Amino acid sequence: MEYAEYRRLDAVGIAALVAEGEVAPEEPLEAAIARAEDVNGRLNAIVYPMHDLARERARAGVSGPLAGVPFLIKDLSQDYAGLPTTGGSRALRGHRAAEHSLTVRSWLDAGLLVFGKTNTPEFGTKSVTEPEAYGPTRNPWDLGHTPGGSSGGSAAAIAAGIVPAAGASDGGGSIRIPAACCGLFGLKPGRGLLSSGPLHAEYFHGAATEGVITRTVRDSAALLDVMTSVADPGGPYLAERPASPYAELARREPGTLRIGFTTRSPLGTPVDPEAVAAVAEAARLLEGLGHTVEEAEPDIDGLRMAHDFLTMWSCEAASTVARIRRETGARPRDFELDTRLLAGAARSVRAADYLTAHDRWNTYARGLAAFHETYDLLLTPSLAGPPLPIGALDTPLPLRILGETTLRLRLAGLAAKTPLWRDQLVANLAPVPFTQLANITGRPAMSVPLHRTAAGLPLGVQFVAPLGGEGLLLALAAQLESARPWADAEPDL
């Protein structure tokens, strides 16, 4: 199969050709591997090739609704039995998964041919993909810019034509941010819909979820059907599924929707005119499709929410570092400085403060639910501006020196109480202030690639739905995709 033929197909299209016997499973796989070998040296999207494993599975014969589709999984939480899952960290380079995660099992059962693992920032804690363990992943639309994070390796691989879809996950925007940076579609499912098992009940109190990034809406719908088909009797929730498959819901008309939009950063930080223009452009398109669009936003203290998110995020980092050190014998220096500082900040968090921050999640969820009593969807920028240059979020040298000193003196917990520390954390969220709301409240959300900057970089817009709104999001996304197609756009590599 030639690359030009392979690139014009999405996952559903490839699966149809394989099912009809028009191509053997090996053909699209070899096209994907050839493309990866051609461009990955410039992108650094794939950090662990699995070519021989995928070839063996293709030769042995695969079955399922997406049989024969080449696929990549994220090197974070998406365990493949017997292979490393490093989470982008030097500390886990010797770790090998004992069994498949349930999400990976669902993909294998569907017949997907997994031939590599994609780059991620250390433990997925950043909105860019620049781990010290593997180096930065670059945006195929401009190699000087980030593809976003933490699923940046997956997004870069899709945008570059290596695969039509890839595994991703989202704990604060990690599906939607890279989708927005790379001109792709990214749906974050709602809380409890997908399993985190078998090693975990849920990630980050259910704020984090597995998922995918894709070029087409129908691929996301088909893959959501695949991922929700796996039962997890040991999981914490029995999530309600719609009566019809998501693939069918994506083909339905969304009806006439009332959509509230805002371009105001919940942090009070600046929003680039390009991000404002992206929302304005989307609003005009939506109105042209018959929807009602008006300026409105949830009654939520966004800055308080950000501080609560960061409080719990630091504790999550501390727990992760402690667990890895306990299980592997890793040394502090095996973790990046920023990870150690984030974990060190958790020393200043009392148990009562942690529980209070978590309890306020209820306040934010009810504020968003009140908004959804009037509006079907919330529309915002996915990002506060265009994709950042590589290195833009590197910790400045003076702060690195200060950080090393505070860690050595075991003063990181005290430093975390200073305005300088808090301002630095908020500054790191400022480029991506819109996405955490959906994670904290557990609502489904998506980034749709409707805008290009003057420099030609993608810049998506975000829609947030009420609980159970995945089908509505897919239906609207399919309508937007039909009105403003994006899947054929291809960077010049």
Image (spheres, grey):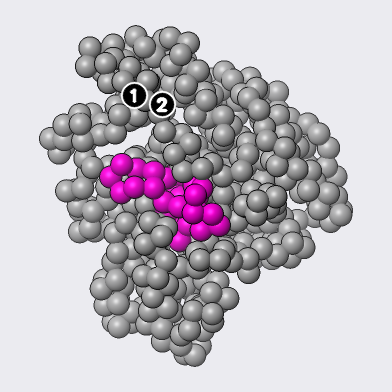
Query: Please, what secondary structure does the residue beneath circle 2 have?
Result: loop
- Please name whichever residue, 147 or 362, is drawn nearer the observer in this view of the structure: 147
Q: What residue do we see at 85% from left, 45% from top?
A: 292
Q: Is residue 68 magenta?
A: no
Residues marked 1 and 2 touching at CB (< 8 Å): yes
Neighbourhood count class around disc 2 (C-alpha, 10 Å): few under 14, some 14–19, many 20 upward: few
List the residue tagged with mark 2.
396
Q: What residue do we see at 73% from left, 58% from top?
A: 480
In percent of width and height, residue 297 lies at 73, 30
C-alpha distance separating marks 1 and 2: 6 Å
Query: Please, what secondary structure does the residue beneath circle 1 have?
Result: helix
Q: Is residue 439 left or right of residue 413?
A: right
Q: What residue do we see at 46% from left, 43% from top?
A: 390
What amino acid is labelled 1 in the image? Arg
Neighbourhood count class around disc 1 (C-alpha, 10 Å): few under 14, some 14–19, many 20 upward: some
In percent of width and height, residue 355 lies at 43, 17
- Please name whichever residue, 235 or 182, is drawn nearer the observer in this view of the structure: 182
In percent of width and height, residue 209 lies at 46, 44
As displayed, is residue 456 above or below residue 127?
A: below
Disc ID at residue 400: 1
Disc ID at residue 368: none
In percent of width and height, residue 150 lies at 44, 44
Farthest left residue? Answer: 329
- Give the quarter of the image for residue 301: top right
Q: What residue do we see at 34% from left, 29% from top?
A: 338
Q: Is residue 155 magenta?
A: yes
Q: Which residues are magenta?
A: 129-157
As displayed, is residue 393 above or below residue 145?
A: above
As displayed, is residue 156 above or below residue 132?
A: below
Q: Magenta stretch mostly in which secondary structure? A: loop
- Asked whether residue 10 appears in the rendered view, the answer is yes
